[in-house]
Amino acid sequence: MISCTEFIPAYSELFKFLEKKQDKAAVVDFWNYLSDTFLTNLKDELIENGIRGCWVYWSKTLKEEAADFTMELDEEAGEFSINMQHCPSKGLLLENKHIEPYPDYCEHCDVLYRRVLEPLGYIYELDRSQTDHARCKLRVKTKKR
Amino acid sequence: MKQIIKQKASDNTYYHQDFHIALNYGINYLHKSFGGEAVREYLAQFANAYFAPLKKELRDKGLPVLKEHYEKIYKIENAVFHMNISPHDLFIHLSESPAVMYIKTNGHPVSSLYQETVITVNKEICRNTPYDCELAEYKHENGAYKLRFFKRKM
């Protein structure tokens, strides 16, 4: 059995496998598939709770992933953000020196979440400029009508 | 009103069971897009890369290394298991897979190739070592298995 604590290297290796087997488009196709099948819980939270659904979803996942972060929600302004000071997933890949992370590993967070958020009327921004240090900034805003 | 949460990594324990669901969908995707052999190729690639230090330890120190590894993993996953080790073999009986049960409990269909996470991965861990393994029993309904590691005949 592969433990859920061993998943991140398995995930990164899957991206590498798909790119080698076919191409980058196959990796993106997988991310789209995973977003549609796996992130139904985020979609359900957003439909039920609006932008607060982001807060509910990421409060649970980031706690379980033992992330180092600051998360903010302003429902009146329609804004939600995560300032990730140490991403446990990218951090784990960087710490395990015997494995080579997939070069575009952090792009999965852009594709997976954007695919859920934008069709529901949210603006999604992900600053990946510091992912080499396991840091990123995620911002969700309600579109002004 | 603005709400803020600040958390440090040390505030929580790393244990996100939803990753079992994501891995299951990874296997499903490979299976439907490229066939069963691709699932085995991928899992072998993963095991060869990620478990390289474990393979080296297995070569150097033998079966107790695997016993220790799986005791740690099953404890993390709160699994019910039984192990028997002798100088020649290591027998593992996992009563129920916490991964399979979590996937099912959350309403996701378990891949028909999910057992490859046991057999392909462990075969790859054993490859190029004096050891091999066989999956004596696997139950698709709950992921229970009986796995035996043994010394290869030279």
Image: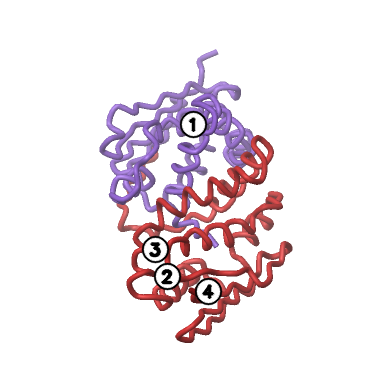
Chain colours: A purple, B red
Of A51 and B56, nearer the camera is B56
Question: Residue at the spot x=39%, y=37% of the render?
Answer: A102
Of B115 and B153, nearer the camera is B153
Q: Is residue A48 above or below residue B42?
A: above
Labels 3 and 1 in the same subunit: no
Q: Amino acid at mark 1?
A: Glu
Residue neighbourhood size for the residue with mark 3, other residues' Cα within 10 Å, grouped as few (<14), some (14–19), many (≥20): many
Label 1 belongs to which residue?
A: A19
Instruction: Give the percent coordinates (x, y) of residue B88.
Output: 49, 83
Q: Is residue A29 above or below residue A9?
A: above
Q: Quadrant of the N terminus of chain A?
A: bottom right
Q: Chain of mark 3?
A: B
At mark 3, the secondary structure is: helix
Label 4 belongs to which residue?
A: B149
CA distance separating discs 1 and 4: 33 Å
Instruction: Specify the quadrant of the image occupied by residue B91.
Output: bottom right
Q: Nearer the viewer, mark 1 or mark 4?
A: 4
Label 4 with label 2: CB-CB less than 8 Å: no
| Apparent side of residue A124 relative to residue B57 in the rendered image (left or right) | right
Q: Chain of mark 1?
A: A
At mark 2, the secondary structure is: helix
Label 3 belongs to which residue?
A: B55
CA distance separating discs 2 and 1: 31 Å
Question: Residue at the spot x=59%, y=64% of the render?
Answer: B98
Q: Amino acid at mark 4?
A: Phe
Q: Is residue A72 above or below residue A26?
A: below
Q: Which comes before the other along the chain, label 4 or label 2? A: 2
Q: Which comes before the other along the chain, label 3 or label 2? A: 3
Q: Amino acid at mark 3?
A: Lys
Residue neighbourhood size for the residue with mark 1, other residues' Cα within 10 Å, grouped as few (<14), some (14–19), many (≥20): some
What's the mark number on residue B69?
2
